Amino acid sequence: MYIQIPEDMAMIVMTIHMQVRPSKLKELLQTLDELRREKRQMKGFIDSLVFTPNDDNDVLTFVEEWNTQEDLDTYLQSYYFSVLKGAMKVLTSSSEISFTTNSHATNRFNAESALV
């Protein structure tokens, strides 16, 4: 069953799937943890979660929730997102970012092309 969420109550979810380079998992997790602490101060940041699907330690999924598109856009132009892109470039062999609103995909692109 699909429930329509009013637009002013919809949150934006950013999901990043990453293939972690060998022996770089700990460094990537430390970076994500530090960024999470810093982002708690940003307007509109709700929460983030990191998990490894199917107990595969070479693959990480990182999920962030934002109150509004404007809040997410501000984050995507921030120093913290630049740090995340840099970490992904150095510590992962591939990554993909997707954005969803109300459980429907709104944008998808390959993170490697966004890092150029």
Image (cartoon, rainbow, N blue to C red):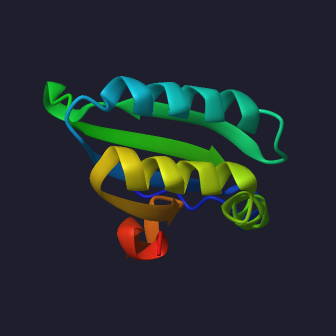
| Residue 35: image location, x then y, percent | 63, 35
Frontmost residue, 41 versus 68: 41
Residue 107: in sight, yes or no? no
Task: Name which quarter of the figure residue 36 lies in.
Answer: top right
Q: In this view, does 76 lie above or below 63?
A: below
Q: Position of residue 61 (x, y in %)?
A: 35, 41
Relative to 84, 58 lies left or right: left
The image position of residue 78, as x and y in percent, is: 74, 58
Depth check: give the residue in front, 18 or 1. 18
**Drawn side of residue 108 relative to residue 74, left or right:** left
> Image point 24% across, 42% down: which residue?
21
Q: Can residue 82 be seen in this view?
A: yes
The x and y percentages for residue 100 are 49, 62
Q: Which residue is drawn at 31% across and 32% down?
A: 24
Q: In this view, does 104 lie above or below 49?
A: below
Q: How many marks on residues?
A: 0
